Amino acid sequence: MAVATLGAVVLDCPDPVALAGFYAEVLGGEIEREEDWVDLKGATGVTLSFQAAPGFVPPQWPRPDGSQQFHLDLTVRDLDAAEREVLALGAKALEAEDRERTFRVYADPAGHPFCLCAG
């Protein structure tokens, strides 16, 4: 028997409203704001939350002396089309040059890595 259920995945960031807006454009869903906290609900079945983190330092990936901390795998139908859209929304390509793979790696506007994965 499980001890708990997953309530939310929470990302530290310098601007919760801006980062929630980025993911709302990528995933859909409804944004709910509090003071230094923003929830994105209804997009994935699990709430994606964003909290203000003064002094936030984005993950460094790929670096042997740094950690990606975590990443999101986002399943898409068309990698090329999804890539164009996330780049237009402010994502940065980290490792998208290998077109033979079934995934491509990006950073969101706050620097968190995420992958677009062919579904």
Image (cartoon, helix red, strand yellow):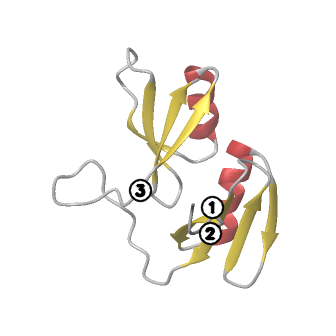
- Badge 1 crowding class, 10 Å Cα cut-off, few under 14, some 14 to 19, many 20 or more, is many
- Badge 3 crowding class, 10 Å Cα cut-off, few under 14, some 14 to 19, many 20 or more, is few
Amino acid under disc 2: Phe
Q: What residue sits 59% from the left and 32% below the top?
A: 75
**Residue that sits furthest to the front in the current view:** 1
Q: Earlier in the sequence, mark 1 or mark 3?
A: 1
Amino acid under disc 1: Leu
Instruction: Tell us which disc is closer to us: 3 or 2.
Output: 3
**Above or below: residue 73 compared with residue 65:** above
Q: Earlier in the sequence, mark 3 or mark 2?
A: 2
- Quadrant of residue 55 in the image? bottom left
| Rendered location of residue 40, percent (x, y) | 74, 60
Amino acid under disc 3: Phe
Element class at badge 1: helix
Q: Quadrant of the C terminus?
A: top right
C-alpha separation, residue under disc 2 versus residue under disc 1: 7 Å
Q: Do residues under tags 2 and 1 come within 8 Å of each other at their CB atoms?
A: yes
Instruction: Tell us which disc is closer to us: 2 or 1.
Output: 2
C-alpha separation, residue under disc 3 versus residue under disc 2: 14 Å
Q: Badge 1 is on which residue? A: 19
Q: Do residues under tags 3 and 2 come within 8 Å of each other at their CB atoms?
A: no
- Quadrant of residue 78 in the image? top right
